[in-house]
């Protein structure tokens, strides 16, 4: 148990971006800064499905990128199995890169359009040193695990549906035999009737392989359905944490309450819309970001996926 | 809230047997396969369906702005007593933007990025109405206030990129209703917005259509959202309306299995756990050859008959469903 509590831990993570400097600020080396992630501490247990919910600009995707070490935090530590991830070197760093995998929202751009599915998976396996006949066998196992038929291996990504592509993205992550899967909005590009298929696949992988999953989504209802723990993020901070039941039925933070109140609820929600507008419920101020600067230049090469 | 019985009201928009085809190689293939739709004055009708169901194409056909390579192959779109199909370009231009306005999912593509928003509304006002300079300025302020923009006088000078997504959607709505249209087509107007902003924009839309008495055709993939603001709803699947009735009936007593299964799939904020309900399989590909009921391969109650013969339309006053087992 003691070991498990330190399985994956974020300690006071901050990620700041520098806004455009004036000439004077360049000389004085001071500059306006904005914190995309503003002091997040979290502990995720092995085998958990942890849900991170928030709206655009709340910092959830930045946090995801810090978790998989696509970007480095300005301050704070990521602890994996008791070790500070930033200090890992050589073999250990390699192992961490394999152990923590990511699945993206937009499979149209995260899969190479010119490679057939077989090659996508073969290259992932090659990174783990698996080639030849064992690779062929493992590719079939992976396809089976994510619920795809092997004839699809001959296809290119654009010949698959969105749901099938998302399954390929998951298979590619599984090829690394990960312990943690970070899924950033894996179903928000999919139709409602298909979302459940992917979410259920993640559940199955969690149950069958013991995979720890960090599910990032703007959809509170989806997250509440499958996660064991939920963190609600707003303006770079985790404003609420708890089990789905606690968060849905006993929310403490005003932002969480507003988020819950905003979700459409079918017939039960008829004639309540004017009330929402008139009571003047408004989202907490988002990061004071000038819309273009930070997302373009300062988040680095992965910003387009953020 | 009491509303007059929809069927007794006169019709503002009536679509009969609308077919829209795309050119595939040498032949034209129907992707919208016989849509019927009614909208009464002041009524809010929802059109729900998943991607590729043909709901947006239907909307674009009303305005006669189908994408290149698509055409109306048959059917009638009667608006205010005139069939819009085959109407001369000039006559259509008069109605487009004046009698029928449209708002889109992405306001940035609909707003001109290099012209301040006030100026864009100004141009629209002066084009569609006999209105003087001063009166137009006053009207812009009024419109911006109507869609819930604070400090309208200052905001008039803002460019679209200076506004948040929710604000842009409000501006686009102001622009759309500036000509006092009889029908507003809203195509996924909140899909790109955060859920908290969506709630506000829907509140705004609901309020202005009450204030102005505009009929709205509200297109969305989100049934729960449609239920909140629509009077009636038509559910589309594979290019056809498969069920249509009042929102209450569709939610409480759906007759089409697609509607039933779709309602089950919506993730709700309740205590349910366990696997999420899904609809197995995939919708048919755009323009695919369809035999029998197109939903049969995914339907939990499909019989042999469903796979071979096209289902009949079951009707009851104010309710229709296209299914062998609707009755």
Image (cartoon, rainbow, N blue to C red):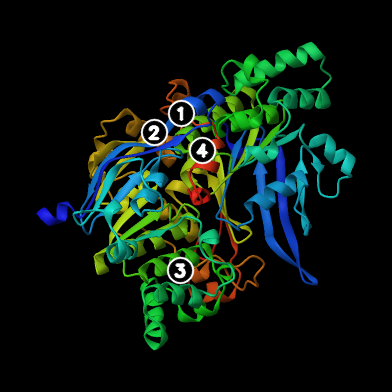
Label 4 packing within 10 angstroms: few (<14), some (14-19), many (20+): some
SS assignment at label 4: helix
Q: CA distance from mark 3 to mark 4?
A: 31 Å
Say which residue label 2 marks.
Answer: A235
Say which residue label 4 marks.
Answer: A294
Q: Residue furthest bottom?
A: A133
Label 3 packing within 10 angstroms: few (<14), some (14-19), many (20+): many
Q: Earlier in the sequence, mark 2 or mark 3?
A: 3
- Report the side of B45 relative to A126 (left or right): right
Say which residue label 3 marks.
Answer: A168
The disc numbered 4 marks a residue on which chain? A
Residues at marks 2 and 1 touching, judged by CB atoms closer than 8 Å: no
Q: Residue at the spot x=67%, y=67% of the render?
A: B287
- Report the side of B150 relative to A136 (left or right): right
Q: CA distance from mark 4 to mark 1?
A: 19 Å
Say which residue label 1 marks.
Answer: A29
Q: CA distance from mark 4 to mark 2?
A: 15 Å
Residues at marks 4 and 2 touching, judged by CB atoms closer than 8 Å: no
Q: Residue at the spot x=60%, y=73% of the render?
A: B309
Q: Which mark is residue B219?
A: none
Q: Earlier in the sequence, mark 4 or mark 2?
A: 2
SS assignment at label 2: loop
Q: CA distance from mark 3 to mark 1?
A: 46 Å
Most foreground residue, B52 or A7: A7
SS assignment at label 1: loop
Label 2 packing within 10 angstroms: few (<14), some (14-19), many (20+): many
Eyeballing the image, is A104 above or below B24? above
Q: CA distance from mark 2 to mark 1?
A: 26 Å
The disc numbered 1 marks a residue on which chain? A
């Amino acid at each position: 148990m003691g070991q498990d509590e330190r399985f994956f831990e974020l300690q006071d993570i901050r990620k700041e971006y520098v806004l455009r400097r004036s000439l004077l600020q360049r000389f004085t080396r001071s500059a306006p800064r904005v914190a995309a992630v503003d002091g997040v501490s979290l502990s995720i247990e092995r085998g958990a499905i942890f849900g991170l919910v928030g709206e655009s600009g709340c910092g959830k995707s930045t946090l995801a990128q810090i978790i998989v070490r696509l970007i480095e935090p300005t301050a704070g530590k990521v602890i994996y199995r008791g070790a500070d991830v930033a200090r890992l070197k050589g073999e250990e760093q390699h192992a961490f890169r394999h152990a923590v995998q990511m699945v993206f929202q937009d499979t149209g751009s995260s899969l190479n359009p010119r490679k057939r599915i077989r090659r996508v998976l073969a290259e992932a396996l090659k990174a783990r040193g698996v080639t030849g006949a064992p690779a062929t066998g493992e590719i079939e196992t992976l396809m089976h695990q994510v619920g795809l038929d092997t004839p699809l291996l001959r296809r290119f990504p654009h010949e698959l549906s969105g749901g099938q592509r998302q399954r390929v993205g998951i298979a590619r992550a599984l090829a690394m035999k990960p312990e943690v899967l970070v899924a950033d909005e894996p179903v928000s590009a999919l139709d409602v009737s298909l979302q459940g298929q992917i979410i259920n696949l993640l559940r199955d992988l969690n149950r069958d392989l013991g995979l720890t999953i960090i599910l990032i989504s703007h959809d509170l209802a989806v997250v509440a359905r499958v996660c064991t723990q939920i963190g609600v993020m707003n303006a770079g901070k985790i404003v609420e944490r708890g089990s789905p039941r606690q968060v849905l039925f006993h929310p403490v933070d005003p932002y969480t309450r507003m988020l819950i109140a905003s979700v459409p609820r079918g017939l039960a929600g008829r004639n309540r819309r004017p009330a929402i507008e008139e009571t003047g419920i408004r989202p907490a101020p988002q990061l004071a970001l000038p819309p273009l600067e930070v997302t373009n230049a300062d988040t680095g090469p992965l910003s387009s996926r953020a | 809230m009491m509303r007059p019985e929809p069927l007794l009201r006169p019709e503002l928009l009536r679509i009969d047997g609308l077919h829209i085809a795309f050119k595939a190689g040498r032949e034209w293939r129907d992707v919208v396969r016989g849509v019927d739709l009614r909208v009464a004055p002041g009524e809010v009708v929802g059109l729900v369906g998943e991607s590729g169901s043909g709901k947006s194409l239907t909307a674009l056909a009303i305005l006669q702005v189908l994408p290149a390579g698509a055409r109306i192959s048959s059917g009638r779109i009667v608006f205010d007593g005139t069939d819009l199909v085959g109407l001369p370009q000039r006559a259509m231009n008069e109605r487009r933007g004046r009698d029928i306005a449209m708002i889109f999912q992405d306001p940035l593509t609909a707003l001109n990025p290099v012209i301040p928003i006030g100026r864009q509304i100004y141009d629209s006002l002066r084009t569609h109405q006999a209105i003087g300079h001063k009166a137009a300025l006053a009207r812009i302020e009024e419109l911006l206030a109507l869609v819930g923009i604070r400090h309208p006088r200052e905001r008039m000078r803002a460019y679209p990129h200076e506004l948040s997504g929710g604000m842009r959607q409000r501006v686009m709505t102001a622009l759309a209703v500036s000509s006092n249209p009889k029908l507003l087509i809203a195509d996924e107007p909140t899909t790109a917005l955060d859920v908290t902003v969506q709630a506000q924009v829907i509140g705004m839309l609901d309020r202005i259509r009450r204030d102005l008495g505009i009929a709205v055709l509200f297109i969305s993939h989100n049934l729960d959202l449609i239920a909140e603001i629509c009077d009636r709803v038509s559910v589309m699947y594979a290019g056809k309306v498969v069920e249509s009735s009042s929102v209450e009936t569709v939610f409480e007593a759906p007759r089409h299995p697609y509607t039933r299964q779709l309602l089950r799939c919506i993730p709700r904020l309740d205590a349910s756990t366990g696997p999420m309900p899904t609809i197995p399989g995939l919708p048919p590909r755009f323009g695919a050859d369809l035999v029998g009921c197109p939903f049969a391969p995914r339907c939990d109650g499909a019989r042999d008959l469903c796979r071979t013969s096209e289902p009949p339309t079951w009707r009851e006053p104010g309710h229709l469903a296209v299914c062998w087992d609707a009755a």
